[in-house]
Amino acid sequence: MHEKLIETIKLKNRMRLDIFDCSRKLAGDRWLIKLVARLKIPVSEVLSQNISYSKEAIKEIKKALGEQVFFEQKRERFFIDETEKATIFKELYDSFMTSTLDYLANDAFPEKYVLKKFREKVEKDAFYH
C-alpha cells in the first residue's frame, strides 16, 4: 500500500497524529479514495504520567504491548471517478476531523487506549492458552 503523508497534527495531549492519503487507481478512471489517520502512543510515557501505576505494572504492560501502540482509523470510498478524487478525499478528511479529532486529542485518550489494547491482549492470550 502506498502511503503519502499529507499532514502531521500535534494534539493538545502531546500526541502526534499523522494523516495519510492511501488512494489508488482501481480500474480505468476509477479510484479507491482512502484516508488513514495514525497515532503512535508511547506506552511508558503515557502510563508513567499517572502515579497510580507501579513500575512493575508498566513493565508488564510494556512486555505485552511493546514500546508503543498504534491507533489507526481508515476512511474510504470505492469506484470514484478520477475527476472527483480531490473532492471526495476532502470530504473524508473533513468528516474525520469533525467527528474524531477532539476524541483523539482528549488528555485521557492515550492512557485509556493503551489499557484497552492491554486488556484485549490479555483476553486473547487467555483464550488461546
Image (cartoon, grey):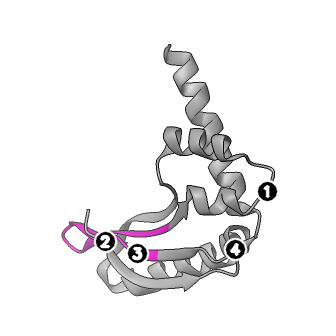
Q: Quadrant of the N terminus?
A: bottom left
Mark 1 vs mark 4, CA separation in Å: 21 Å
Residue 51, numbered label = 1
Distance of label 4 from label 2 (alpha carbons): 23 Å
Helix, strand or loop for the magenta stretch, by majority:
strand
Quadrant assignment, res 31: bottom left
Disc 1 vs disc 3: which is toward the camera? 1
Q: Residue 106's spot in the image, x, y percent?
A: 75, 70
Q: Amino acid at mark 1?
A: Ile
Q: Is residue 85 left or right of residue 87?
A: left
| Mark 4 or 3, nearer chain start | 3
Earlier in the chain: of badge 2 and badge 3, it is: 2
Of callouts 1 and 4, the N-terminal one: 1
Q: Amino acid at mark 2?
A: Glu
Residue furthest to the front: 55
Which residue bears the numbered disc 2? 3
Q: Residue furthest left?
A: 28
Mark 3 or mark 1, which is nearer the start of the sequence? 3
Q: Residue at x 70, y 74 (%)?
A: 105
Q: State how far apart marks 2 and 3 are (Cα).
A: 6 Å
Q: Residues within 10 Å of mark 3 (few under 14, many from 20)?
A: many
Pointer 3 residue: 20
- Secondary structure at badge 1 equals loop
- Count neighbours of disc 1 (C-alpha within 10 A) and say few if under 14, some if 14 to 19, many if 20 or more: few
Q: Which residues are magenta?
A: 19-38
Q: Is residue 26 magenta?
A: yes
Q: Residues within 10 Å of mark 4 (few under 14, many from 20)?
A: some
Determine whether label 2 and label 3 are within 8 Å by CB. yes
- Which of the two marks, 1 or 4, is nearer to us in this view? 1
Please give the name of the residue rendered at 33% of the width and 86% of the height, measured from the top-left corner.
Answer: 83
Is label 4 in a helix, a strand or a loop?
helix
